[in-house]
Image (spheres, rainbow, N blue to C red):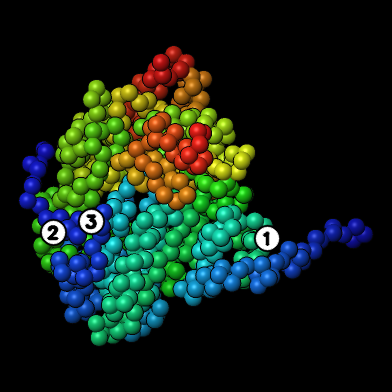
Amino acid sequence: MPKPMNMNHSQPLSTHLDLANPQNLKAYQSTGGHEGFTNALKMQPQEVQQQVTDSKLKGRGGAGFSTGMKWSFVPMGEQAPKNKYLVCNADEMEPGTFKDRWLMEGSPHLLIEGMMIAAYAIGANVAYIFLRGEYRLCATRLQQAIDEAQAAGLLGNNINGSHFSLQLHLHTSAGRYICGEETALINALEGKRANPRAKPPFPQVVGLFGRPTIVNNCETLCNLPCILKNGAQWYTQLSSGGDTGSKIYGISGRVKNAGLWERPMGTTAGEILTLAGGMQNGLTLRGWLPGGASTDFLLPEHLDVPMEYDAIAKAGSRMGTGLIIALDDRHCPVGMILNLLQFFAQESCGWCTPCRDGLPWAVEILTRIEVGQGSQDDIDALQKLCSFMWLGKTFCALAPGAVEPLRSGMKYFADDFQQHIDHKGCPHRH
Amino acid sequence: MSNPIPIMQIDPLAQPRVDYRGYLSKKEITAIEHECALYESRPAAAIDALQIVQGERRWISDESLYAIADMLGMSAAELEGIATFYNLIYRQPVGEHVIHLCNSISCWLHDFKIIADHLRKSLNIEFGQTTSDGKVTLLPNVCLGCCDKAPALMLDGDLVENLDIASIDKLLKELSGGKDA
């Protein structure tokens, strides 16, 4: 059932947002900024954790794991190791995803406050922002904001006269998708080749430099200030569906006005498409990826499904980053899947065989089909590859992520695949 | 045993070594030391160090690689494994300007291939090459994270969005110093 669009929703994530001229610390504080952190500092770290658990906040990086639960595995108390780390995963490289850039460019102090709250909650005294290298403007604005916070005594030793100290550093990466995988990110931060690590041990116990470490997505951390400012109950009431809070949704592809909007969790893809003004003139929607390149295709008939983790899973896909990629009827689904698989083949770290060999193999087969040299055997081979690269057979989630658009695309666009084979060419090329 | 299989002796010190003090500039050394101080171990500053040196010298030569490895106390092979892992670290000389054209899905849906072909033809090079006058290097890039303004490219670190043939022509003209490309 499509929900009516709620125009009175709060927009805690974008309330401070100004892309042209982001708020400085003073402006941020005079519009309610740092009230969440001030509240957190009055509580015990475990109480902050409890508040976040009660808010039912789920990680916005794509996996949708409970943030409070993730934190709860960090050793706390007197016996806990002294050095713990917090890392912001801002290595936003999922194709079709541009929400973290928006938040960091438009509201750098919000992320910093979120990190201060998270670091306090887990007892970390050093935090890093792991930023992708291409985000130059983010780097400049974040560094300015960090310097400002440092000068105002909000970062450093004994913040606001408390016992809490936090050093916050910006690390700019140099462009590699796998660094977004949290254990690969930790290796990258240690100056190692960014291959994922085996789990267990989990980073919460043995992470960066062997210390307990939490890696949270940028948008996840940006949710914390409003939770601590207004309380968990307020946060759960922002949305009316199964998942709580506010979400940055977006859409790209051949829509009239591609972009980003903050809406309550559970907004439907149809509403997001409407916000974008619908498809461009003369084009019809054929399918869509709900949250980045590594999510299964859905069809126009799924536009009424609320964009929340369980509902999208039930429809056969994953919410992922919540940024939709729309496929129109002028573009070839096989060509689109080939482009997606080329991305994953290139970005595979090469550590495990199914991913290193399977992805280029899939690209080779898809290329053959796309140029009209494919056969029925190729379809069978692709099906087999989907199974060889599925969860449990690879070291991390990169290859299974690549399988998602491939397997669902082969299911929903089977006719297109067949046409390529029967007519020995792409029907979309004239 | 009359014919023992010879065991290859690998001398760990045999690798080429460049003393960083004689190779890197004072500015580079200061900047790298600043980064080293932010981490628990010196090799953790590897990416930063590569970016700092590349920022000064445009690319990472073998000598630069050895010097950084020397400064961070890691093997050159290990550093090479990192340097070659990343898209934005150049292990070959690049031109005065570097263009990274996004080739991921949202740009694909906006027919970035037309832009790619126009760039290749105008510059008379393939992706991965530098123009003969050493002015421009053309490279592909995965999703630049501005999918709402596709197609897009990155020129020397700055985004150029909503590309079309006319904007590419204008850009190339500017790069060639206002003369007709």
Name the spot of residue A177 as percent of width and height, x first: 44, 50
Taking the image as shown, residue B140 lies to the left or right of residue A139, namely right
Q: CA separation, marks 3 and 2?
A: 26 Å
Question: Can residue A296 be spotted in the picture?
Answer: no
Disc 1 secondary structure class: helix
Question: Can residue B88 be spotted in the picture?
Answer: yes
- Residue extending furthest toward the right: B2
For badge 3, the amino acid type reads Asp
- Image point (29%, 38%), residue name: A252
Disc 3 secondary structure class: loop
- Image point (41%, 49%), residue name: B158
A183 to B71, vertically: above or below: above
Residue B63 badge = 1
Q: Which residue is mark 2?
A: A236
Q: Residues within 10 Å of mark 1 (few under 14, many from 20)?
A: some
For badge 1, the amino acid type reads Glu
For badge 2, the amino acid type reads Thr
Name the spot of residue A110 as percent of width and height, x first: 25, 64
Q: Which residue is mark 3?
A: A18
Name the spot of residue B54 as percent of width and height, x first: 56, 58
Q: Are marks 3 and 2 in contact (CB under 8 Å)?
A: no
Taking the image as shown, residue A284 lies to the left or right of residue B145, namely left
Q: CA separation, marks 1 and 2?
A: 57 Å
